[in-house]
Image (cartoon, grey):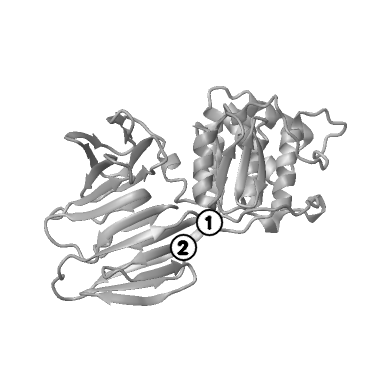
């Protein structure tokens, strides 16, 4: 049996709660010794394939216990059975990547509350916590009227010219072009707060997923030679194809001279352009896009990316990028892949609408994925189990220490 097949088998045993202590030990060893990252990638792929809808519920107590069992597999066992109940502890000898990956195995159980063994659930005292973000946004109409949006409301909101605007359940805004010629260009702006996300279908059928602390400005009806929109923050686009009218995204971060343009015909791509990030990233999943900045342009093929270094005003082409990492937020996950603690905490701050304070520099990097539908304490627990960092939650403030 190959190493890959063996890992798949051991993961299955752990997830079904039938693994012996020896099998848990073997699983722990395999992942900890994965210096190439190949097994890490395999487990992450399995998680993405097997996890159900990321908006499903979770079981905090059981998640803690499963993580504890797998991380405790290094200890000598006295019987060939499941590892007995233990409280999670900090394991400083485990590399950060391995620890996060081992904890990620428990995510299967986090989203499968009906399969747990109630006898294994340990009582965990309630702690102060911060709930994850959700579907909420503010729609500003052409006349300046502001309409608050959330996932609960549904129905027709208004009609502007020959376009009907409705909201469906689940945080989706829909623009429907009616009969007749478009009026003069009228623009709407959809803004998500920190801790918010929303989806909009534009009048041409283009679908846009807007991440937290972002805004999208677009016409109520497209006319002319191009479909022009403006993005600040992060969004994933599925552009309806129209060769006669290219789709163009002007990207702005709100900082002086931090703008560029992405032009497409029909494609799927992600743009990340936050003011507090050092780079603007465009990642192409399908089709083709051209990214332009001050006369310099890069043509992207699927699986490639363009990165604008804002400090040095340098636009570069990335020949091969992790597309799953780029769209993890859209699929309900926080992606840790290769990111340092500062980058991870900026992502957490935007999604959970919290303030982050560092008491000292923390030289930690992480790998793995975490569902972002869980309270912030669970995300911090996963990071803290690496032994590289410690967190304290005070109201809506997260204090980070080495």
Q: Is residue 12 visible?
A: no
Residue 126 placement: quadrant: bottom right
User: Contact (CB < 8 A) between labels 2 and 1?
Assistant: yes
The one nearer the camera, 180 or 359, is: 359
The one nearer the camera, 377 or 194, is: 194
Is 43 situated left or right of 275 in this image?
A: right
Vertical relation: 168 (above or below) 200 = below
Q: Is residue 265 visible?
A: yes
Residue 190, horizontal then vertical, whole percent: 35, 61
Q: Which residue is mark 2?
A: 136
Is 321 situated left or right of 393 in this image?
A: left
Q: Which residue is mark 1?
A: 133
For the N terminus, the image quarter is top right
Is 359 situated left or right of 75 in this image?
A: left
Q: Name the residue at 13% across, 72% down.
A: 181
Q: Name the residue at 32% across, 63% down.
A: 201
Crowd class of label 1 (few under 14; some 14 to 19; many from 20; radius 10 Å) = many
């Amino acid at each position: 049996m190959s190493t890959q097949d063996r890992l798949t088998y051991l993961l299955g045993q752990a997830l079904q709660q039938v693994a012996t202590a020896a099998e848990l030990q073997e699983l722990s060893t395999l992942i900890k010794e994965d210096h190439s990252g190949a097994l890490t990638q395999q487990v992450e792929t399995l998680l993405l394939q097997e996890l159900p809808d990321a908006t499903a519920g979770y079981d905090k107590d059981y998640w803690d216990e499963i993580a504890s069992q797998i991380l405790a597999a290094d200890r000598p066992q006295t019987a060939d059975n499941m590892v007995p109940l233990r409280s999670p502890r900090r394991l400083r000898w485990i590399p950060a990547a391995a620890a996060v990956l081992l904890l990620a195995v428990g995510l299967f159980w986090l989203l499968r509350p009906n399969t747990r063994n109630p006898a294994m659930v340990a009582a965990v005292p309630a702690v102060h916590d911060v709930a994850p973000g959700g579907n909420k946004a503010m729609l500003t109409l052409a006349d300046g009227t502001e309409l608050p949006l959330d996932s609960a409301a549904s129905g027709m909101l208004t009609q502007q010219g020959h376009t009907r605007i409705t909201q469906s359940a689940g945080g989706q805004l829909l623009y429907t072009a009616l009969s007749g010629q478009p009026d003069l260009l009228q623009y709407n702006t959809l803004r998500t707060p920190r801790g918010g996300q929303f989806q909009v279908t534009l009048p041409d059928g283009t679908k846009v997923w807007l991440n937290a602390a972002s805004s999208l400005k677009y016409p109520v009806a497209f006319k002319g030679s191009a479909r022009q929109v403006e993005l600040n923050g992060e969004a994933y686009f599925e552009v309806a194809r129209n060769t006669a009218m290219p789709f163009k995204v002007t990207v702005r971060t709100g900082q002086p001279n931090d703008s560029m343009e992405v032009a497409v015909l029909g494609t799927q791509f992600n743009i990340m352009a936050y003011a507090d990030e050092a780079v603007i990233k465009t990642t192409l999943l399908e089709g083709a896009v051209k990214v332009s900045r001050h006369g310099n342009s890069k043509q992207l093929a699927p699986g490639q990316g363009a990165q604008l270094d804002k400090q040095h005003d340098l636009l570069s082409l990335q020949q091969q990028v992790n597309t799953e990492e780029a769209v993890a937020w859209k699929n309900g996950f926080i992606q840790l892949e290769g990111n340092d603690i500062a980058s991870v905490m900026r992502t957490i701050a935007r999604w959970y609408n919290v303030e982050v304070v560092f008491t000292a520099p923390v030289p930690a990097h992480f790998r793995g994925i975490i569902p972002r539908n869980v309270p912030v304490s669970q995300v911090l627990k996963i990071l803290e189990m690496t032994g590289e960092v410690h967190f304290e939650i005070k109201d809506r403030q997260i204090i980070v220490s080495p």
